[in-house]
Image (cartoon, grey):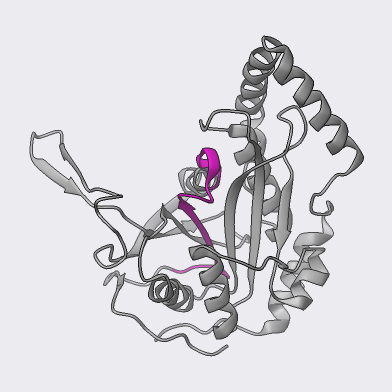
Amino acid sequence: MRDPVGVDELIWGTGPKPDLDRPLLVVAFRGLFDACGSATAAVEWLVERHDHEELGEIDPETFFDFTQERPVVSFDAEGVRRLAWPRNPLVAVHTPPGRRDVVVVAGVEPHLRWATFSRALAEAARRSGAESVVTLGSMVGMCPHSRPLAVTGSSTNPDLADRLGLDQPSYQGPTGVVGVLHDTLDQVGIPVVSLRVSVPHYVPDAPNPKATRALLRRFGQVTGIETGHEELDGPAADWQRQVDAAVASDDEIGEYVARLEATVDENENMLPSGDDLAAEFEAFLREQGPASEAD
């Protein structure tokens, strides 16, 4: 693996380096590719379920238009006034022994200097010893709420895509920071997988636990990391019942959803299931050799 160019914008902690077991870097950004907040919610779910510690962050100063993403003023419990800037912290998540650990970024999509921002994330992957990167996203699509929400997986690495049954990107046109990040990781030799869940376009942009559950389930299948997605079964069922009631009250929407259901039932587009996915992923990473770590 070639080392990425270091960047000053990566603020790395000065404390002892945490002992991480074969970590993966998992990234999601609040913004265009986080419909209903489902992707960042999935990353935050991983953090909340395990012991974790902050490794550092990417300095926001040069990456944000603060007229679009404004800092927030508040008062703490002692009445002291605090100013909070948009953040992209890097957090180490310690999973149970024998499982891969995770370094996560669940922050705000930057507005500016995407190439430099992506190099900072690639350097964070190198310093943390991450063997691969997984980006999570959620996008509005033509999917009915009453069916399993499809998760599309892709990788620009042909070998990894073939072994995991993933698509290879075929899109041409304007892209976002995640597209720039994937290109940057390709250039420095870090394998990257993209997982994106489709959320119903006719449901308001509100928290969607069914979509978050779908992302976590597929992430666990691919990586072998236990996500506890089953704990979202109840919230996902409640969400679906609420949408069922709203759809039932509108005949036009009800007919539209019925047509979507018929289309999806005929043409499913999901990653292959099976326990062999995680085994193939592990084998691929072993064949790449050890991750390059900072001194």
Query: x, y (%) of residue 95?
Result: 55, 55
Tell me the quarter of the picture where residue 260 sits: top right
Magenta residues, start to end: 19-39
Residue 248, x across and y down, in percent: 71, 12
In the rendered image, is residue 25 in sight?
Answer: no
29 in magenta: yes
Residue under the point 9% across and 41% down:
81
157 in the magenta segment: no
- The x, y position of residue 155, in whole percent, is 70, 68
Point out the image quarter for the N terminus.
Answer: bottom right
Question: Which residue is farthest top?
Answer: 249
The residue that appears at 52% across and 32% down in the rendered structure is 207
Q: Say above or below: 170 vs 32.
A: below
Name the side, left or right, on which 232 lies relative to 176: right
Whether residue 106 can be seen here: yes
Residue 119 vs 164, above or below: the answer is below
Report whether 142 appears left or right of 106: right
Q: Going by the image, does 32 lie left or right of 107? A: right
Foreground residue, 152 or 93?
Answer: 152
Image coords of residue 127 (percent x, y): 43, 77
Q: Residue furthest bottom?
A: 2
Assign the C terminus to one quadrant of the image: bottom left
